[in-house]
Amino acid sequence: MGYILNIETATKNCSVALAKNGETILCKEMAEQGFSHAEKLHLFIEEIIKEAGITFSDLSAVAVSQGPGSYTGLRIGVSAAKGLCYALETPLISVDTLTVLANQLQIENGIIIPMIDARRMEVYSAIFNAKKEMIREVQAEILTDSSFSNIDDAVYFVGDSNEKAKTILSKSNFNFVDTIFYPSAQEMSAISYRKFIDNSFEDAAYFEPYYLKDFMLQTKST
């Protein structure tokens, strides 16, 4: 097969990776406080194609992080991916953002909980076992001191919500991995390759990011 271009823009990290047979060849990324995805994304894509010594016609597919995450970031990434797919007549692959984030951590036992910061004490999260299998689907939730309290295994939190989560999640089996903040296109390579082999493609005409807009509201007790 040819190459798959992976695009991840769901958070502050603007990330692009080129992969072949599920292995990342090149990756360019930058995480900034002010979202600069609109300026950086197309530059990264062009630089990677040039540095790899290939042309856009060598791409077999384009993969994009589907969310949840930043509304603006997701729109930029998905728009770029869809534009490339239309122009090149190549398949579009979507990859769950929290799966990408969880795949950065290697553990032998325990639970991985990737969390993406929303606002205040709100997060987007999912739960994975040590094999990176999702055992609880993606949810939007408000963190409380009882969040994930039903889990007795060792829990490893990753993502940009760790600082605020530490102030309220204090069970002895909770571990905060402070070296993994954002999802990266590097971790999309193996996932998008498996989807390519399985012909798991999106309809570029109708595909929309997974915004998780129906967010639960915290109500005051009366």
Image (spheres, rainbow, N blue to C red):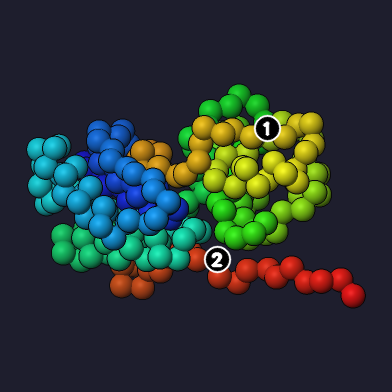
Of all residues shown, which one is farthest toward the top? 108
Residue 29 relative to residue 164: left or right: left
Question: What secondary structure is marked by label 2?
Answer: loop
Q: Which mark is residue 118?
A: none
Residue 7 percent across, percent down from the top left: 32, 51
Of the pair 98 and 11, the residue shown nearer to us = 11
The quadrant in which the C terminus is found is bottom right
The quadrant in which the N terminus is found is top left
Residue for badge 1: 175
Residue 174 percent across, percent down from the top left: 72, 34
- Please give the name of the residue rendered at 40% of the width and 61% of the height, measured from the top-left corner: 74
Of the pair 173 and 1, the residue shown nearer to us = 173
Of all residues shown, which one is farthest toward the right? 222
Mark 1 or mark 2, earlier in chain: 1
User: Could you tell me the amino acid type at mark 1?
Assistant: Asn
Question: What secondary structure is marked by label 1?
Answer: strand
Residue for badge 2: 212
Residue 52 relative to residue 133: left or right: left
- Please give the name of the residue rendered at 50% of the width and 41% of the height, measured from the top-left corner: 181
Residue 85 percent across, percent down from the top left: 23, 61
Of the pair 176 and 193, the residue shown nearer to us = 176
- Please give the name of the residue rendered at 64% of the width and 59% of the height, measured from the top-left corner: 120
Total marks placed: 2
Q: Whole-Å distance between the Cαs marked 1 and 2? A: 26 Å
The residue carrying pointer 2 sits among few (fewer than 14), some (14 to 19) or many (20 or more) residues within 10 Å by Cα, namely some
User: Could you tell me the amino acid type at mark 2?
Assistant: Leu
- In contact (CB < 8 Å): disc 1 and disc 2: no
Residue 193 percent across, percent down from the top left: 34, 43
Can you tell which quarter of the image residue 158 is in? top right
Of all residues shown, which one is farthest toward the front? 34
Query: In the figure, 33 relative to 213: above or below?
Result: above
Of the pair 89 and 37, the residue shown nearer to us = 37
